[in-house]
Every structure is written in structure tokens, then in C-alpha cells.
Amino acid sequence: MSAVWIEPEETATAPLGQPLPKDLKIDREDMKLEKRLCREVGRAIVDFNMIEEGDKVMVCVSGGKDSYAMLDILLKLQQRAPINFSLIAVNLDQKQPGFPAHILPDYLSKLGVPFHIETQDTYSIVKRVILPGAAPQIAETLRLVLGWAWTYVIVAELVGSSSGIGHMIMDSQRLLDTGQMIFGILCIGVIGLVSDLLFKWLNQRMYPWAF
């Protein structure tokens, strides 16, 4: 049974002293890859008893290369399998703006593969439900990032700036002006605290259900 599922590997050689043309070499490499994929899928089906007599196999086709390849492999295995099984391709149409919805049905119709297109407007759900639900956490994260950004600005001014509060503190340190240094540090703290409280207040006003 497994001998039917798993096609034996073939090794082809060019005539002695005659190199293969480039196009023929590419075609041969493509064929070898196709046979290898079919062989590995067939081995997995046999080893794990994945398909039995009369099964109806649903192939989820997203439109990506991997799902196209899986459908193509199963179609090839279906032709030589020792059992009868059917295939049905299933796709989820999420109503993404600008997505060409006709391509996949046209392709499957051309292959003669039965298919079902499940239409669910998940794009609108993301906009209407998921994003508003995640917005409070996103805003809170932005508030924390604002604090980090303020810290990095001050560090940059301390290290290599010619203006700003950090530069003023470094100048005051060199001039031993303790009062101005303390004033600069207090300014940093007050600006950071006020911006944090303001951002938190805005979040509470915009998303009162999350606080």
C-alpha cells in the first residue's frame, strides 16, 4: 500500500559528455522537488494513517504558496492512491479592502476542484471590536514609552548636546553651580511627571471603561 502512496525516487543522468541545457536542467530540478514533496507527504499519510477509504479531505487554501502546493500534491496523490478519497478546497474571504476575490474561485474552477468560500467580514470586526478593545492597553503602553523617550532625550543632552536641560546641568556641574544643577533636575522631574499625569488623564477620559 505504501508503495503506491510513495513514488520511488528516480535519478536521471545526462548523456555522457553532454551537459544539460539550462532550461531542461531547471525543469528537471523542479520535477525532482515535486516528486520529493509528494513522496514525503505520501510517507506522512502512510505513517500516521491520515487518510482512509471514503474520506473527504478539506484543504484550507489561503492564497499563499504553501496552501497551493498542498492542494497540488494531494491532487497528484489522489490519482494514484490505493484508496478513494475526495478533496474540497475551503477559503475564508475576510473582505479585505482591495483583495481580488475572484482569483481563487477562478483557479479552483479551472482545476475542477470542489470548493467552498466562507465569507466572514473579519476586517470590520477588527476595526469595530478588536482595535477599540485593545486601544486602552495601547494608550497605556504609549504613556510608558513617553517616559522612556523623555529619559533618552535627557541622556542625549547630557552626553552630546549644545542646548537643553541636560546641557545646562553639565555646564552647571563644570561651573560648580549647585543651585542651577538642582533646578535643572527639578525641571526634568516636573516635566516628566506632568506629561505622565496628563497622558494618564487623557486615557481615562477617552477610555473610561478601562480604568
Image: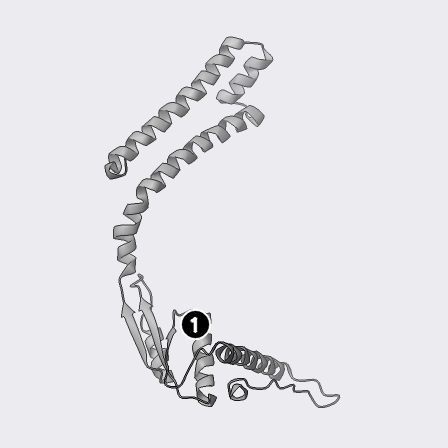
Q: Nearer the viewer, residue 56 or 182?
A: 56
**93 with respect to 18 (left or right):** left
Q: Which residue is mark 1?
A: 67
x and y percent of residue 20 in the render? 67, 84
Toward which corner of the image does residue 119 lie, by quadrant? Answer: bottom left
Which secondary structure lies at badge 1?
helix
Please report the residue visible at 32 percent of the width from the left and 45 percent of the height from the top: 134
Amino acid beneath label 1: Ser
x and y percent of residue 182 in the render? 49, 13
x and y percent of residue 197 in the render? 34, 27
Q: Nearer the viewer, residue 165 or 188?
A: 188
Please report the residue visible at 58 percent of the width from the left and 10 percent of the height from the top: 175
Toward which corner of the image does residue 210 lie, by quadrant? Answer: top left
Please tell me whether residue 22 is drawn above or below residue 141 in the rendered image.
Answer: below
x and y percent of residue 103 in the render? 35, 74
Which image quadrant: the C terminus?
Answer: top left
Q: Residue furthest right?
A: 17
Please report the residue visible at 29 percent of the width from the left and 58 percent of the height from the top: 123
Please report the residue visible at 37 percent of the width from the left and 28 percent of the height from the top: 196
Please tell me whether residue 205 is drawn above or below residue 126 in the rendered image.
Answer: above
Circle 1 packing at 10 Å, graded few (<14), some (14-19), many (20+), is some
**97 with respect to 34 (left or right):** left
